[in-house]
Image: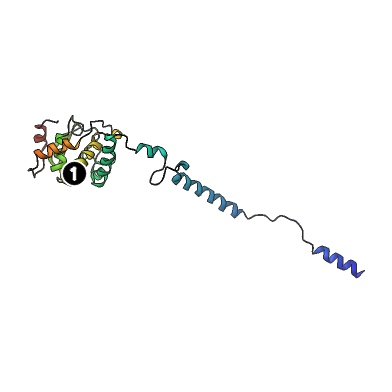
């Protein structure tokens, strides 16, 4: 055989060629998982790609809903924070429905929704103990006093405004002003003991 032809055949067999190598399926799976979790992240933290939305808020609607729009809204927003920070939420719950057999509801309570805050201010300031009827249910309470002593008149008014005006609970009573709180506190400044329901019922509700 001609050596030149032999060398030529050998060289041709070493020439690079174009072909296709299958991509491992695992790479597609990893890519799919990455895209999935990226979407979850963007959905949770992207705020609808609105530059005005950031954590801890998830949507522009949430941000708008929390924007104070007037005096009542300012008091409500402030009171909501006190309701959580002071531990009211632990007993009366975020829903305002209380705990059956232990802590009475604030949602729909005739004591909360009275025309005025005279009785509620006294309860928060000094506490309440003994039997009381709330929403046609008998309760035996031992609510400690002193909660009001850590609040300024303005903060006290904010807390009551939140509880009385929380529409999510079905409450829609009037807002409370610091002046109303101060007036009642001045009247009871020397009292150190908790109130009883019969005492409170003898006091005008506003």
Residue annotated with mark 1: 152
Residue 199 drawn above or below residue 33: above
Image point (47%, 48%), residue name: 41
Q: The C terminus lies in which quarter of the figure?
A: top left
Position in image of residue 179 (x %, y %)? 17, 36
Report whether residue 35 is seen.
yes
Question: Residue drawn at (30%, 34%), measured in percent from left and top?
Answer: 168
- Relative image position of residue 104 (x, y in whole percent): 21, 38
State the image coordinates of residue 115 (x, y, percent, origin top left): 18, 29
Point out residue 46 in the picture as x, y percentages from the top left corner. 46, 45
* Residue 1 visible from this viewpoint: no
Position of residue 38 in the picture relative to residue 94 (left or right): right
Asked if 5 appears above or below 97 in the picture, the reply is below
Q: Is 103 placed left or right of 195 in the picture?
A: right
Element type at marker 1?
A: loop
Q: Residue furthest bottom?
A: 3
Q: Residue furthest left?
A: 190
10 Å crowding of disc 1: few (<14), some (14-19), many (20+): few
**Rendering colour mode:** rainbow
């Amino acid at each position: 055989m001609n050596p030149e032809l032999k060398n030529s055949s050998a060289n041709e067999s070493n020439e690079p060629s174009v072909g296709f190598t299958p991509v491992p399926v695992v790479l597609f799976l990893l890519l799919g998982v990455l895209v999935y979790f990226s979407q979850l992240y963007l959905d949770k933290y992207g705020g609808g790609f609105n530059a005005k939305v950031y954590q801890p808020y998830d949507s522009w609607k949430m941000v708008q809903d929390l924007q104070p729009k007037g005096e009542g809204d300012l008091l409500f927003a402030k009171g909501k924070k006190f309701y959580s920070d002071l531990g009211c939420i632990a007993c009366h719950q975020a829903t305002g429905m209380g705990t059956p057999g232990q802590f009475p509801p604030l949602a729909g309570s005739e004591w909360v929704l009275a025309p005025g805050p005279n009785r509620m201010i006294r309860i928060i300031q000094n506490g309440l103990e003994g039997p009381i009827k709330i929403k046609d249910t008998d309760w035996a309470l031992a609510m400690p006093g002193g909660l009001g002593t850590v609040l300024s008149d303005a903060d006290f008014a904010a807390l009551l405004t939140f509880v009385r005006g929380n529409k999510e609970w079905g409450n829609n009573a009037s807002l409370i002003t610091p002046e109303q709180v101060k007036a009642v506190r001045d009247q009871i400044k020397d009292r150190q003991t908790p109130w009883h329901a019969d005492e409170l019922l003898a006091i005008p509700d506003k």
